[in-house]
Image: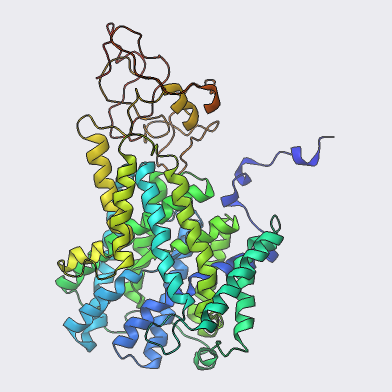
Amino acid sequence: MPPRAAVHKPPSSSHPVDETLPARRLLPAALQHVASMYAGLTAPPLIIGSALGLTPAELSALLAATLLVAGLGTIAQTLGAFGVGARLPLVNGVSFAVVSPALAAAAAQGRDDALPAIFGATLVTGLLCLAFAPVFCRLVRFFPPVVSGCVITLVGLSLLPVAGTWVRGGEPDAPGFGSSSDLALAAATLAITLAVHRTLSGRFLGRVAILIGMLAGTLIAVPLGKVDLAPLTQAPLFALPTPFAFGTPQFVPAVIATAAVVMLVSMMESTAALLALGAVTERPTRDRTIVGSLRALGLATALGGVLGSFTSTAYAQNVGLVALSRIRSRYVVTLCGTLLVLMGFVPVLGSLVALVPLPVLGGAGVVFFGSVAVAGIRTLAKAALGTGHNALIVSVSLALGLFPVLDPDFYRRLPEPAATVLGSGITAGCLVAVLLNYILNHLGRGTEANPDAVPAEQVAALDGVSVPRPLSGGSSFAPPPHVAGFDTAPPRAAHPGPWPYVTGPVEPAEPGPVRGAQDFPAPSAPPGPGEGAPTEGVSFPGPLHPLHPRHHGTQRQNPNPGPPG
């Protein structure tokens, strides 16, 4: 009788993303996701509603609609049906980028017409996102490891200042902002989380260390007077979101144009979060995955325009939570979405989550926000930073992406549309990385690395691939098979490739022996004319990008190869 470990599992249940957890594990893991994103989800409607002077009943209706739409969008993302949804543990919610444009629209339209104009623009931009999702997903081919690594790193780094604000109390204008008690409470939460993660490593309780840390931090905050029970006593028992409850939508061209920019920012941020999630879950993020995710994003945004919510986006903090907990089941996030829907109908449930003080949430946020940045750094490690232009691309992209994070007013004097786009550090860094990668690595004779400076076999061994190398001179290098051929070849089950976040199916390649890096001598000078031809059957990956021309086998062979160009 074979040992228990050798029992074969059905292929349909082999991937952790499709794993169904028992109820005793499913609920705590889902509550962990709800607690980590609740503050970020409710902040935009609270800020906008308070600025417009909404009544408590109107503000409650705004929050209920926000929770309901976020829950429905999250369920659509995780389950996926009819081409809608990523079928990954991706959480949807209101984008914080909508706050500034919404307040500007309120100042221009007046209090009575502000929300109808905002929700009318939200409805239009949601439909536009739904229509252009197949076109937008094609932009992901501009995200080789050097670009996607920069974007994922910026996603994590741009969230760390948010955790820092929560650690100090959340309100910079509050009298006790940054007090020693808040800092101590955040430090205690962080210490408990790390202790649980260390001592219970390998067990399920270790995977929900964030939830345990937040519960313990909240209990510590009770005798310190840091837990506000007012939301629990004031929240209505039942709320039913009503379509167009804030008036018939108005379609103001200026407001729609601004909302379209916010939608573009949200689509780029969501794509970046999806790339990070694909790397974390080790499930390739293909074109159809991104199309499905953007369709769910557009439907949620359009539904928000009907029910009274705002532009949706993917929440990167939950990606970090997946990376930290290693619970990759999408059904955990499906339950998270279900709980959000229940909170939309029963606001008292949402008030229970609101009892968690912001310093406690900030202490936990240090962990799962940083986990996203680590995922980006691991991606950058595969981008050949030692040679070529990639190190320069990373340094400039991170710098320009962090400027608006460190100083939110950095681009304030630019025209409003440009300030809205560049005001997001993720978007600014993404645009710079894509542009520099194209200019430095794909225009003219530019490449990511000089193939004559590093032995081709060594690079192939380190990257885990072996692809044909053209025998002619010049600087055009064929991309590896797992990047090129997006729509023409099926996935290769035996070797998924070292970059699971790259979109498109994998082109099959003949397996060959791969030696370790220790088996190769130090790099030597390139051969001179007549000293030897390039090695057949091996190729330096070059730019690792599908925009480069493809040359296979002997199609590019030159009977009289010259020196490298």
Find residue 360 and report its horizontal and vertical position in percent: 55, 76
Nearer to me, 216 or 138: 216
Find residue 185 and report its horizontal and vertical position in percent: 57, 79
Q: Identify whether 501 is placed above or below 357.
A: above
Nearer to me, 388 or 434: 388
Find residue 231 and report its horizontal and vertical position in percent: 50, 89
Nearer to me, 197 or 62: 197
Q: Residue at x 30, y 63 (%)?
A: 424
Nearer to me, 185 or 85: 185
Q: Quadrant of residue 551?
A: top left
Q: Residue at x 27, y 14 (%)?
A: 563
Q: Identify whether 295 is placed above or below 38.
A: above
Q: Identify whether 74 is placed above or below 504.
A: below
Q: Residue at x 40, y 78 (%)?
A: 43
Find residue 229 and report its horizontal and vertical position in percent: 55, 91
- Coloring applied to the structure: rainbow
Q: Residue furthest right?
A: 1
Asked if residue 220 lies left or right of residue 80, the reply is: right
Asked if residue 133 lies left or right of residue 378, the reply is: left
